[in-house]
Amino acid sequence: DNFVRVSGDAIEMAKAQVFAWEASTRGDLAGHLQANPTQVMLAKKQHEERQKKLQELRNREMADRYGGLEHVKKPAEVAVLAQTESNFVEYAPDGRPLQ
């Protein structure tokens, strides 16, 4: 029975319930999840969108300020797969390289 509780919409409903509790303690939301689930889910969706936009803005500001966008981009798969271990060197316990 417990595997049903932690799958599907049960997890989303639990997250929505926590969001509703936290929003009501902050005074942001006057709704109740069981009384008006549409209002709570809409507010949760809007909150997540605002959070995503703020995170993107912060990331962009940090990149503009400090640079480093070349490190954010993923390398091409061909380059990753083309790497070999030809430069691998095994060492003996006394520190001399073994060949």
Image: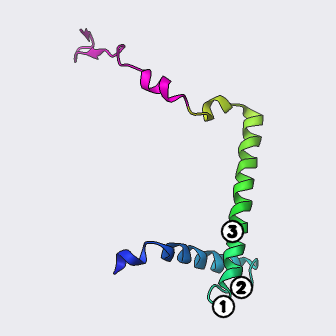
- Tell me if residue 13 comes above or below residue 66 in the rendering: below
Which amino acid is tagged 3?
Lys
Residue 27 appears left or right of 91: right
Q: Earlier in the sequence, mark 3 or mark 1?
A: 1
Does the magenta stretch mainly form a helix, a strand or a loop?
loop
The reply to whether the magenta stretch includes residue 6 is no
Image spot of residue 4 (x, y percent): 39, 77
In the rendering, which numbered label is found on residue 35?
Answer: 1
Report which residue position mark 3 lands on.
45
Q: Element type at marker 1?
A: loop
In the rendering, which numbered label is found on residue 18?
Answer: none
- Tell me if residue 94 comes above or below residue 54 in the rendering: above
Residues at discs 2 and 1 in contact (Cβ within 8 Å) = yes
Location of residue 49 (image quadrant): bottom right
Report which residue position mark 2 lands on.
31
Marks 3 and 2 sit apart, C-alpha to C-alpha, by: 14 Å
Which amino acid is tagged 1?
Ala
Q: Which residues are magenta?
A: 75-99
Marks 3 and 1 sit apart, C-alpha to C-alpha, by: 18 Å
Residue 97 appears left or right of 7: left
Image spot of residue 71 (x, y percent): 61, 31
